[in-house]
Each structure stands twice: as C-alpha cells, then as structure tokens.
Amino acid sequence: MDERPFADPEYEQHALSLFQLHLSAEEFAARFAHEFVLFNFHRFRYRTLGMTEWVDHLAAFLCAGDLSGRLRAARLKYLTPEEIARVEAHERDPL
C-alpha cells in the first residue's frame, strides 16, 4: 500500500504544468532533466490517472547511479544532434 500523501490540487496542477505525461519518463528526462535542480515530486501520490507511476519512473531514472551516462544514452535515443547540443550548452552555462 502506498502511504505517501496525495499532492494538494495546486501542487498537482503545478506538476502537470511541468511534466509532459505523453512522453515516456526516459524521453522527458532526456529533454528536460537539465532544467531541474531538485526533484521531489515523487514524495506524493497524484489523482491524475497514471501520473504517480510516471513520476515514480522519472524519479527512478533521475536517482539511479550514473545519471550522466543514462542521460547521454537517452538523449542519443530521443533527441536530434541539434537538440543535444542545446541541452549540453545549457548544462555548461545554465544562465
């Protein structure tokens, strides 16, 4: 039984505004992980169908070992060379 609390409606709406649930968690990480400094969305359950599981998959991807290697592999799988270059430029100089 999942004993995490449900996110309050405002927090869930905020999370929905950030995440693109139509993408796999791996593709989302490839495209957007560089925009997150902290990730704590997995502390909650969500009422939106499938969102809790999707967030859990994303958290597992982001929190497992060798994140840089897994992100590189996911980017090669999902992104064009131009998209990879933009993401990597942002990682080097996020401002």
Image (tube, helix red, strand yellow):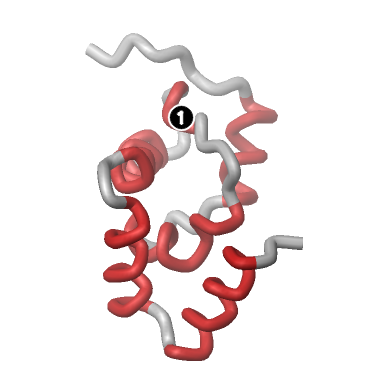
Q: Position of residue 90 (x, y in %)?
A: 63, 68
Q: Quadrant of the C terminus?
A: bottom right
- Which residue corresponds to mark 1? 46
Is 42 situated left or right of 92 in this image? left
Residue 9's quadrant in the figure?
top right
Q: Position of residue 65 (x, y in %)?
A: 26, 44
Q: Position of residue 80 (x, y in %)?
A: 43, 88
Depth check, front residue: 19 or 47: 19
Is 51 situated left or right of 13 in this image? left
Q: Quadrant of the N terminus?
A: top left
- Does residue 16 lie above or below 3 as drawn? below
Q: Is residue 22 visible?
A: no
Q: Position of residue 30 (x, y in %)?
A: 41, 65
Looking at the rendered structure, the secondary structure element under dot 1 is loop
Q: Residue at x 48, y 18 (%)?
A: 6
Residue 4's quadrant in the figure?
top left
Give the residue type at disc 1.
Tyr
Q: Residue at x 34, y 52 (%)?
A: 67
Residue 86's quadrant in the figure?
bottom right
